[in-house]
Image: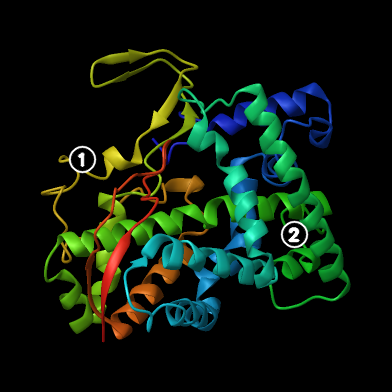
Amino acid sequence: MVKDWTRFPPTLDLLVAHIQQSGRLPREMPDLDAMVQSIVSLRPTQELWRAHRQELTDPWVGPGAARHRDMITRHVDLIIDTWIDRPGPVDFVAEFARPLPQRTMASVLGFPVEDIPQLEVWGNAQVMSYVHGCGHNNVLTPDQTAEKFRLLAGMSDYVRDQVRAKRANPQDDMISFLTQVEYRALGRRLTEDEIDGVVYAMVIGGLETTQYALAEQARLLVEHPGLYAQLRDNRELIRPFIEEAMRLRSPTQGLSTRITSQDEVFQGVAVPAGSTLHLRYGAANVDADEFEAPHELRLYRKAVTRHLAFSAGPRVCPGAGLSRLEQTIAWNRLADRLADFAYAPGNTFLHQPGIMLGTLELHLDLTRA
């Protein structure tokens, strides 16, 4: 389904078509976020969607993410340094899983590290509909929507200031690249509004998902005695562990991202054309018809990356390469510096509401290496 754009078109296609047919510029519609506005001009079709990924994001957060290896390693070590010699338990979410993707994304984009607290505020505003929205379409109340866009207005101003500065004095970061690149698919450079939209997409996709993946991986390691020791002894097992962990506990459990273009029947249930489909990646990843012993964590599972944690097909997550690299470096460096860890007293295991699977706090007792 996720691979068939024609039969199951993305819900955004309907919005893009409506905007194009209305004859109004996207920026004149105040209830559209920056990402949607940029989709209308940069990637309204499947062909342009693919070109957008290949030309604009792949070099930085896709296959080209390896360029960030040293930077991510520095951030991981700096974060660990803040608590490695401190007695008592550590909140793994607040003190590792959350700051790592925040620091990484800030560095990729070229934002100063000291601006990360504000970046977190904007990131939280971006995902409000996925946390507090109602129904399959994650609908916010009018007051919630107004609050979301009030917070995000400052983000656009901030990004545009960064764009102007980097256009005049380019650095080695993604925003500088976006100010200078000739987008071959359209034969021109990007506007400020379009760069703002690309940055919006990077932030919404690059913070909480990696945070939740790392936190759930820590829980799996605690709940499988001896597994962490295996990873420490054989670092080649870290990558298959990460893939299995994302399959078992997908950070994004589901999204209402597709529409039926024709009448369909799913397992005997008739679904009429024009229906919104809420795709449950988390359920697909433990489908017994697709995975042997689906609820078991198997480090030697064949085709270990064949899961839907990042979706699949033409709309696959553009930042999958960066997230995988962050997770791999994180567990390698943690394995260097921690001999073991276990649940500390006081964990409630409360999780984020909505479509995400993420522990809000995770207190761990650490055994230093």
The residue beneath circle 1 is: 287
| Quarter the N terminus occupies | top left
**Residue 109 position in % (x across, y down):** 66, 66
Front in this rendered view, residue 106 or 238: 106
Residue under the image location 27 percent in, 58 percent down: 245
**Residue 201 position in % (x across, y down):** 62, 50
At label 2, the amino acid type is Tyr
Residue under the image location 80 percent in, 75 percent down: 170
Instruction: Specify few, some or many for label 1: CA neighbours under 10 Å numbering under 14, 14-19, or 20 or more.
Output: some
Residue under the image location 33 percent in, 74 percent down: 331
- Badge 2 marks a residue whose secondary structure is loop
Q: Is residue 22 left or right of residue 103?
A: right
In this rendering, the count of numbered labels is 2
Residue under the image location 85 percent in, 76 percent down: 169
The residue beneath circle 2 is: 183
> Is any atom of residue 243 visible in this view?
no
Q: Is residue 48 above or below residue 135?
A: below
| Quarter the C terminus occupies | bottom left
Q: Is residue 14 above or below residue 115?
A: above
Q: Is residue 361 left or right of residue 13?
A: left
At label 1, the amino acid type is Asp
Which residue reaches farthest right? 168
- Badge 1 marks a residue whose secondary structure is loop
* Sooner in the amino-acid sequence: mark 1 or mark 2: 2
Front in this rendered view, residue 238 or 131: 131
